[in-house]
Each structure stands twice: as C-alpha cells, then as structure tokens.
Image (cartoon, rainbow, N blue to C red):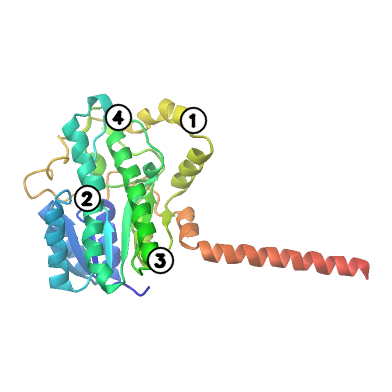
C-alpha cells in the first residue's frame, strides 16, 4: 500500500495518537485529529504541520456515534477520501472492580470499546463503496490477558479483539479490499497515567518495561500500510505476556495477583480527578503532549517490534540459513564419501 493521503486518528491529542499523528504527518499525509481536548488537538496540529503534513482539528466525543459520523463527514469534505482510520481513543481508571461504579464502568466501555465500534462503522461506510482503505484498531496485551485493577479496560480490550476478528471475517467473506488489523501495545510512556482517575494510595504507573509512544506510533503506521496482517505485537513484554497466557494462564493469574497491583503504583500522590468524564483543566483540556513522566527509563527501540514488522524478511532469512546449512552438510557428506 502506498503512503496514505488522508488519515483519521481518534485520541489524537496525547500519547500514542499524538505520536502517530506526527508520524503520518512526516509522510506528507493530511491528518484529521479527533479528540475531546481542543487545546491539545491544536497543539497536535502544529506538530503535524511542522512534520510536513496537513492537519484538521475535529473535536468530538468518540462515545457518541453521531459525533464520530460528523467528524468523518468533515474529514472527507475538507481533506478528501479517508485512506486510513486509526481507532486509538481510550479512557480508564485504576481501582479494584468492587470500587468502580456502574456508571464509571459503562463510561470506560463506551469510550474504549464502543468508540472503536463507532469509528470502524464510520470508516466502513466510506471505504466499502470505494473498495479500499485500512482500519487500525489500537489495543494492548490486555486484549488477551486481563490484569488486576483494570477490569473495565481489560474487558473493553477483550471486546475490541473479538469485534475486530468478527469484522475481519466478514470483509474476507465478501472479498472486500478494505482491511482491518489490530496493534497490541505494551506499557507506554504516555500522559494517561496522570490523566486517569485512581482510588489507590500512590501514583499510578505502567508495569515495566515502559516504551516510548514513538515505538507504538511506528507500529501503527506500519500496520496501516500492511493491514493484511491480522495483528501486530509491540514490545517484548507484550509477546512474553501473550505467549505465557496461551501456555499457562493459571500460573499467570497467580503471578499477576502477587506482583501486578504493586507494579501499577509508585511513590507519590496521584494528582487530580482524572479525565474520565471530561478533559482535565477546563472545558478545552490542557495539552499534556505525547510523553508521560517516564522519559528517563522509557525504551525508544524494540527488537521484537522490528521482528513483528519484518516477519516475512525474518522467515526468508531463516529459510536461507536452513538452506545454507543443508548445502554445507550435503557438500561435507559428498566430500567424505569421495
């Protein structure tokens, strides 16, 4: 697939969405920036312009299907036919399940899961008649493996995984050239650990290792151009978690119960009520940028991510190595027989 001309990214004001917006902008794409915080989206738009792209700010609530549809209309009217739609918006809170109200659980589900459903519907409504386009659903290792203190988010990620598989099968059945793929992320150094509400005694933190959002953004861009792949795993921790869960889920249950509650906290007080219901710091929302507070330790490169993006090349290399080894063995055997 050639470099996209028009990209829509939800949750574009911070974190992975912000980094992905810059990455697509550096390819010369027109990028429609969808999110709640107008100030953050305006700041993201300046970065897209600096990177060489053409931004369009589209404030919208992804939990509202009408708002998502209106954003899609505006994107196509102002920028042209959408080539790539990236479902990235997410919200959550950190608390034991028994301390999460039904309203809070519903809110996480509506933004994180149904936001992707609404985005995919809006994208397909436009892509299917043209018989082209790519949809990237940004998820995480929690699409397969739930963790403590994140029942609402884990449930939403599992739902996204099942939803994406269902839509993929329907597209394959119809012979459509529209593709849908999923990117499974590890812990990422984004502002969400400052933004999500918490009922824990200490500051929230991602389980280590933590990766820079640019690592995730590279995977999103690659997935958009190689959407025939059903999914991409980013980071060695994602691969290790998903493999361990497939092999010994009960052992992983006990390991996470013993270690993961402490792993999601660190010294310091959690600040503010969070952004579950509205952008923080006023109706427009403060600009937090792409990075969180973990720059000093965050990993900027992932060998596993390179392997995931270059699986075909790795396979060819392994075949070549095996063929070379077989050739050496055969030649040595002939020499001995001679």
Residue 250 picture location, percent across and down: 49, 30
In the image, residue 291 above or below residue 309: above
The residue that disc 2 covers is 115
In the image, residue 148 above or below residue 26: above
Residue 191 picture location, percent across and down: 24, 45
Image point 46% across, 43% down: which residue?
Answer: 242
Separation of residues labelled 4 and 1 (CA atoms) = 30 Å
Separation of residues labelled 2 and 4 (CA atoms) = 33 Å
Separation of residues labelled 4 and 3 (CA atoms) = 41 Å
Q: 139 and 217: which one is in front?
A: 139
The residue that disc 4 covers is 267
Q: Of discs 4 and 3, which sits in the foreground?
A: 3
Location of residue 319 (image quadrant): bottom right
- Pick whichever of labels 4 and 1 is earlier in the sequence: 1
The residue that disc 1 covers is 250
Assign a secondary structure to mark 2.
Answer: helix
Image point 36% across, 70% down: which residue?
Answer: 177
Image point 35% across, 68% down: which residue?
Answer: 176
Location of residue 119 (image quadrant): bottom left
- Pick whichever of labels 1 and 2 is earlier in the sequence: 2
Separation of residues labelled 3 and 2 (CA atoms) = 23 Å
Residue 92 picture location, percent across and down: 24, 39
Q: Residues within 10 Å of mark 1 (few under 14, many from 20)?
A: few
For residue 225, say whether it is visible. Answer: yes
The residue that disc 3 covers is 226
In the image, residue 208 above or below residue 285: above
Separation of residues labelled 1 and 3 (CA atoms) = 34 Å
Assign a secondary structure to mark 4.
Answer: loop
């Amino acid at each position: 697939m050639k470099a996209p001309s028009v990209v829509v990214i939800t949750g574009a004001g911070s974190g992975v969405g912000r980094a992905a917006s810059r990455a697509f902008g550096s390819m010369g794409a027109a990028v429609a920036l969808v999110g709640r915080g107008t100030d953050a989206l305006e700041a993201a738009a300046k970065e897209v312009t600096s990177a060489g792209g053409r931004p369009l700010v589209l404030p919208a609530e992804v939990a509202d299907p009408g708002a998502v549809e209106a954003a899609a209309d505006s994107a196509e009217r102002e920028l042209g036919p959408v080539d790539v739609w990236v479902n990235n918006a997410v919200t959550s809170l950190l608390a034991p399940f028994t301390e999460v109200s039904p309203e809070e659980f519903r809110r996480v589900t509506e933004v994180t899961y149904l936001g992707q459903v609404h985005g995919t519907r809006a994208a397909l409504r436009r892509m299917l008649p043209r018989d082209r386009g790519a949809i990237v659903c940004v998820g995480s290792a929690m699409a397969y493996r739930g963790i403590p203190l994140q029942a609402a988010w884990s449930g939403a990620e599992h739902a996204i995984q099942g939803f994406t598989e269902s839509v993929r099968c329907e597209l394959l059945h119809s012979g459509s050239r529209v593709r849908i793929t999923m990117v499974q992320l590890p812990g990422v150094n984004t502002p969400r650990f400052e933004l999500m509400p918490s009922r824990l005694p200490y500051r929230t933190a991602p389980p280590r290792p933590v990766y820079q959002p640019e690592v995730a953004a590279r995977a999103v861009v690659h997935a958009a151009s190689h959407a025939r792949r059903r999914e991409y795993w980013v980071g060695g921790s994602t691969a290790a978690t998903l493999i361990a869960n497939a092999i010994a889920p009960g052992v992983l249950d006990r390991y996470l119960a013993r270690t993961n509650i402490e792993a999601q906290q660190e010294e310091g007080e959690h600040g503010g009520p969070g952004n579950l219901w509205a952008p923080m710091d006023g109706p427009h929302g403060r600009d937090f940028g792409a990075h969180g507070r973990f720059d000093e330790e965050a990993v900027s490169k992932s060998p596993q991510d390179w392997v995931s993006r270059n699986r075909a090349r790795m396979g060819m290399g392994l075949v070549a190595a095996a063929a070379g080894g077989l050739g050496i063995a055969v030649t040595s055997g002939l020499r001995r027989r001679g």
